Amino acid sequence: MILVTGANGRPGSAVVREFARQGHPVRALVRDPAKVGDLATLPGVQIVHGDMLHPETLQPALAGVRRVLMISGAGPQLLETQCTFIDAVRNAGVEQIVKFSGKDSIDGFDTERFRSTRSHEQVLRYLVASGMPWTVLRPSQFMEVYFEEVPDLVRSGELRLPLGDTTLAPIAIQDIAKIAYQVLTTDGHEYTTYAMTGPEALTMTEAAQYLSEAIGKPIEYRDVTSAEKQREWMQAGYPPARASAFAQLFEERSRLGHSTVDLGTHRRFQVEPTSFLEFARLNAATFRGDSEYTVTPA
């Protein structure tokens, strides 16, 4: 059996849906039963409840599991949550952990400089030291984070970000899910890190042009300061710690300025990369403000 944690979040739910699409059974761990949504109706999906921070709640989830895809919220408790979970998985006799991490597409980005990325590096060191076979998935920024710009797109026709001419190479979560499915259901991926980006390094001006084409409405990129954007995030209800972390991240991206596309993992697993324009067209109703979307967890 394969277990996917964080199964009601963006990447976790996408992986669970890919298992259902492929007709492969999967177990989905959620902490809050009220947030399962339609996952319980998908064929082959077994929902289990438990808290990664509390090993005593995880016995049903881990029983008979061979591999785990470890995903948890990116908040302040990520380090403690995932290290505690690694211990529980090892004690349960699971064969392998596949850790969902991240790798910024920006050239020269130092993950140790920022809390939001440093925690992942600390977890990786703990995972390696645990002695368990491991695999790491390291996607770049999700294309889905642009859903959070929908209020500005609808209200002012602007994509407002503090990036200047910086390029980013975002990846569609569905691409990651297809790769994760193959990693979790085939052998030979132990002690391997799979980095991945989307197929294009885009300026935000280019991203705005693609959004315009997809939704049939003019969208312009507006370069704002990180302080302005941080205020806007907080006004939108972001917790202060998250707004501050995002501001620091965008400042570093703006300072470094250039992204490199890496499609080696896509080629390795024969997954056709989704372009930003394709993604925008597939989600045109969301970008027009006509359908709901999920915001990044705190």
Image (cartoon, rainbow, N blue to C red):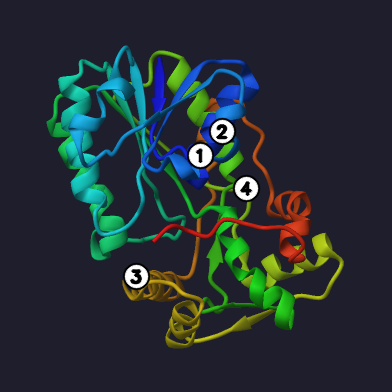
Position of residue 85 in the picture relative to residue 219 (left or right): left
Question: Can you tell which quarter of the image residue 138 is in?
Answer: top left
Nearest the eye: 45 or 183: 45
- Image point 60% across, 23% down: which residue? 20
Distance, label 3 to label 4, CA atoms, is 26 Å
Task: First in sequence, mark 2 or 3: give its number.
Answer: 2
Circle 2/circle 1 CB separation < 8 Å: yes
Task: First in sequence, mark 2 or 4: give its number.
Answer: 2
At label 1, the amino acid type is Val
Distance, label 1 to label 4, CA atoms, is 32 Å
Q: Which residue is mark 2?
A: 39
Circle 1/circle 4 CB separation < 8 Å: no
Distance, label 2 to label 3, CA atoms, is 31 Å
Circle 1/circle 3 CB separation < 8 Å: no
Task: First in sequence, mark 1 or 3: give its number.
Answer: 1
Distance, label 2 to label 1, CA atoms, is 6 Å
Q: Does dot 1 land on a helix, a strand or a loop?
A: loop
Q: Nearer the viewer, mark 1 or mark 4?
A: 1
Dot 2: within a 10 Å radius of its alpha carbon, few (fewer than 14), some, or many (20 or more) residues?
Answer: some
Q: Which residue is mark 1?
A: 36
Q: Which residue is mark 4?
A: 199
In this rendering, the answer to whether 33 lies above or below 106 is above
Circle 2/circle 4 CB separation < 8 Å: no
Nearest the eye: 5 or 110: 5
Asked whether residue 298 is in view, the answer is: yes
Q: Does dot 3 land on a helix, a strand or a loop?
A: helix
Q: Which residue is mark 3?
A: 245
Task: First in sequence, mark 3 or 4: give its number.
Answer: 4
